[in-house]
Image: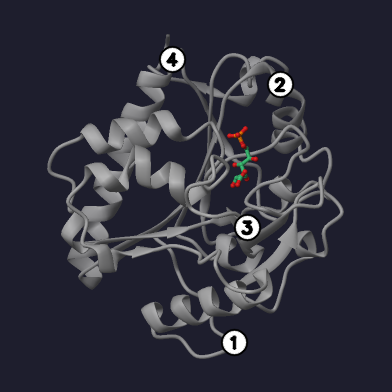
Amino acid sequence: MGKPPRVILFPDSEGMAGVLLERWAVTATEAIRRKGHFVAALSGGKTPGFFYGAMAAKKNLPWEESHIFLVDERYVPEDDSDSNYGMIKRRLLSAIPIPPGNIHFISTSEPRPEIAARKYEERIRDFFGIPPGSLPEFDIVLLGMGRDGHTASIFPGSPLAEGSRFLSEATFDSAGRPRVTLTLPVINNASNIFFLVIGEDKAEAVRKLVRKKDPAMPAARVGSEKSEVLLLVDRGAAMLLDTGEYERYPPGR
Ligand code: 6PG
């Protein structure tokens, strides 16, 4: 379990998207300069849709050299309203000039989620050129957090909250619905980890996350000495924090 995340409070979603887009652009440019490509893993759910829309509208991002993976997926068809890939495709991928081969989604048409998880793991290993036992290093992992403190598809009480020897695993959400998810070791090996958390209903989970009140909470397991964890919140999500526990954007606001 890493150090507490750095928390930045935003007055509105435009400011949050602007800062994250700037971080994205700088990280992508540096990664492409250093290794010829940039690779990010994106979460689904309701929160990040606004950010994906802002990213789709931003010109001059280096999509030719950018690769997009999914942090997790609900095991439903792409056209299901719950599909993370379906949402990311609608809000972002269909609106940007990214080569189809640069999009690495989680298949949900395998006979069983476990097969999809193994195939996703193979795809990750092939892309990063890593043997079994090695971890991929994503340049950015973008996470959300549920009211219960889950992140990715790692839910409270799941053995995945203790880690995994796999890169991706089949699991279930708290209602028993099948999911496929990146595992904690993969998430924690990323160079940059961003949480986007919005809304008063997340305030208690944010308080626990920042104060590491509940080490068993999956989102509290995110972080390592290696990667900075940045938690971007709005006023609602930050309402149970003390003023000393977050920075404001714009500064001094
Ligand atoms: C998912 C996400 C999940 C999400 C949280 C928050 O597939 O649901 O990957 O981890 O980030 O559940 O979801 P909301 O943004 O909808 O609150």
Q: Earlier in the sequence, mark 3 or mark 4?
A: 4
Mark 3–mark 4 CB contact (< 8 Å): no
Seen in the picture, residue 182 relative to 17 is either above or below; the reply is below
What amino acid type should be assigned to the residue bearing mark 3? Tyr
Image coords of residue 243 (percent x, y): 63, 15
Callout 3: helix, strand or loop? loop
Image coords of residue 130 (percent x, y): 45, 86
Nearer to the camera, 132 or 83? 83
Q: Residue furthest left?
A: 60
Q: Which residue is mark 3?
A: 75
Which label was assigned to residue 144?
Answer: none
Q: Which residue is mark 4?
A: 12
Q: Is mark 4 within 8 Å of ligand 1?
A: no
Q: In the rendered view, does 89 fall on the left or right side of 26?
A: right
Mark 2–mark 4 CB contact (< 8 Å): no
Callout 1: helix, strand or loop? loop
What amino acid type should be assigned to the residue bearing mark 4? Asp
Q: Which residue is mark 2?
A: 201
Seen in the picture, residue 4 relative to 188 is either above or below; the reply is above
User: For the residues marked 1 and 2, what is the alpha-carbon distance in whole angstroms?
Assistant: 38 Å
Q: Nearer the viewer, mark 1 or mark 2?
A: 2
Please tell me how crowded label 1 is: few (under 14), some (14-19), or many (20+) other residues with Cα within 10 Å.
few
Q: Which residue is mark 1?
A: 133
Residue displayed at 37% across by 47% down:
89
Find ligand 1 in the image and state its quadrant.
Answer: top right
